[in-house]
Each structure stands twice: as structure tokens, then as C-alpha cells.
Amino acid sequence: MQNLQGKMCVAMYEGLGPQVLPIIEKVYGEYGFEVGLGLKEKWKPGGLDEAIKAFVRMCNDNGLPSEVEMRDGVASWTGYRCPFGIENTHRPVCEALMAMDRELFRAVLGLDSGRMEFTIDKCLAAGDECCKGIFRLL
């Protein structure tokens, strides 16, 4: 299902241009927040390190190989398969879609808006060999 969503977002970006990116970011951010509320009850994490470990376990259990390294309260996450199937397409689409993960963690951790940052260092959509992202509390 997520592959179809990824294809739809790529098609909208290619057909309509970058003005669709804020819409993708808003919709997938809201979706991630809703998913995160459910995961908060399931995971009951004590902080970012417990939440990110549960996230990586969930990814790995669902065929999305991932790993994480925690250092000084910052989570460095690496993923080796795109859940949206948008490898070798457009980095901006990936960045918009990843509002989902940022907002998922915001909900899981009970953070106010703007208190979770997720930056993307490498991106499968841009043709990189993996995705590398940093989750940081603000």
C-alpha cells in the first residue's frame, strides 16, 4: 500500500511541481501523528532511545532493514529499503514524506509541535545506497 502512495506522491511532484510538497508534508505529518498516538500506547517508551529502538524493531519485523545508534540524546537512523518504493526518484518527495516519521515520534513522545527535528543526510530517493537520518529533540 505504501508503494502506491509513494508512486502517487512522485507522480504529483512530477506533474504539478514543487508546490505539492507542502501538501504531502502536511498530510503525511498528520498521518504519522495519528499512527504515533497508537504506538505510544503499545510501546510506552521512556524517551527517544526506547522509542527509536522500538521503531527499528518494527521496521525490521516488517521487512524494512534498519539500524540506529544513539549518542548524546541524538538518534542516528539508517534504513536500507524505502517503505514508499521511491528509490532513485526525487529527494524532495522523500523529505516531504518523512514528515510522517518526525510526527510519529512527536506523538509517541508526547512532544509539542516543533519539538522534534528529523534531518536527512542520505536518501534512497536521491540514489544513495541507504537512508540516513538524525532524530533530535529540540
Image (spheres, rainbow, N blue to C red):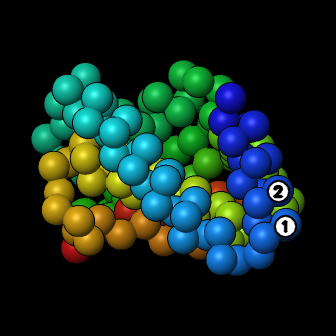
**Residue drawn at 72 percent across, 54 percent down:** 9
- Give the quarter of the figure containing the N terminus: top right
Name the quadrant containing residue 103.
Answer: bottom left
Spot occupied by residue 74 in the image (x, y as percentages of width and height): 32, 64
**Residue drawn at 41 percent across, 45 percent down:** 32
> What is the three-letter code of the residue carrying label 1?
Glu
Spot occupied by residue 31 in the image (x, y as percentages of width and height): 43, 44
Q: Is 15 placed left or right of 84 in the picture?
A: right
Residue 89 seen in the figure: yes
Q: Which residue is mark 2?
A: 11
State the residue in front, 85 or 47: 85
Mark 1 Cα-neighbour bin, 10 Å: few <14, some 14–19, many ≥20: some
> What is the three-letter code of the residue carrying label 2?
Ala
Spot occupied by residue 80 in the image (x, y as percentages of width and height): 69, 46
Q: Which residue is mark 1?
A: 14
- Give the quarter of the figure containing the C terminus: bottom left
Q: Is 89 placed left or right of 82 in the picture?
A: right
Mark 2 Cα-neighbour bin, 10 Å: few <14, some 14–19, many ≥20: few
